Image: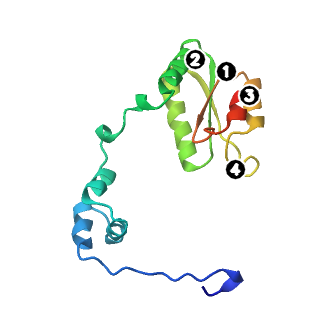
Amino acid sequence: MKKTVAGMQKKNWHIRPAQPEVQRLSEQWKVSPLFAQVLLNRNITDRQARSFLSPKLTDLIDPARMPGLTAAVQRILRAIETQEKIAIYGDYDVDGITSVAILWHLLQMLGADVDYYIPHRVDEGYGLHDDAVQQLAEAGTQLLITVDCGVTAVRQVAL
């Protein structure tokens, strides 16, 4: 590879020729020709494309199959019934903020005493942090729910 500005490597792009079915699939799937071409280049079948572009709830797996989910739901319901203070902790990226907002709204509708914590992007960065967990505990949080983070934060969860 050739070197270019600032020592970056120059990449050679290999563009596949347009496939004749692109326009037909673009119209059938109601997507741009470019997106149809990308799906074709990735060997996405018509069935896979339709499933992705027009998902149905019946296509989802039963959430009860997730290990520990039933116990988690029971714990949340108990916290709501006994008015324990619940905090939702999520990252500051779009899926983290969205997850926090949706769960916060649901718990509010169910009558929970709920708050949330989103770490500062520059000062704290991604993930579940010891200091934040400690602050939440000191503020009276009895149940901490993490969304979009915390899956591997065993030490922080133990706090």
- How far apart are the two marked residues, 2 and 1, measured between alpha carbons? 8 Å
User: Closer to the camera: disc 3 or disc 4?
Assistant: 3
User: Closer to the camera: disc 1 or disc 4?
Assistant: 1
Q: Image height check: is 146 above or below 35?
A: above
Which residue occupies 33% across, 71% down? 37
Residue 76, x across and y down, in percent: 54, 21
Residue 84, x across and y down, in percent: 62, 17
- Mark 2, Cα crowd under 10 Å, few <14 / some 14-19 / many 20+, is some
Q: Considering only order in the chain, which callout, 4 or 3, is on the residue closer to the N terminus?
A: 4
Left or right relative to 44: residue 107: right
Amino acid of disc 1: Gln
| Residue located beneath label 4 in the image | 121
Q: Nearer the viewer, residue 18 or 101?
A: 18
Quarter of the N terminus within the rendering: bottom right
Identify the image's colour scheme: rainbow, by chain, secondary structure or one colour: rainbow
Q: What element carries label 3?
A: loop
| Residue located beneath label 1 in the image | 142
Q: Considering only order in the chain, which callout, 1 or 2, is on the residue closer to the N terminus?
A: 2
Q: Is mark 2 on a helix, strand or loop?
A: helix
- How far apart are the two marked residues, 3 and 4, measured between alpha carbons? 22 Å
- Mark 3, Cα crowd under 10 Å, few <14 / some 14-19 / many 20+, is few
Q: Considering only order in the chain, which callout, 3 or 1, is on the residue closer to the N terminus?
A: 1
- Mark 1, Cα crowd under 10 Å, few <14 / some 14-19 / many 20+, is some
Q: Considering only order in the chain, which callout, 4 or 1, is on the residue closer to the N terminus?
A: 4
Quarter of the C terminus within the rendering: top right
| Residue located beneath label 3 in the image | 159
Q: Considering only order in the chain, which callout, 4 or 2, is on the residue closer to the N terminus?
A: 2
Q: Is mark 1 on a helix, strand or loop?
A: loop
Q: Are marks 2 and 1 in contact (CB under 8 Å)?
A: yes
Q: Image height check: is 17 above or below 96?
A: below
Which residue occupies 73% across, 32% down? 133
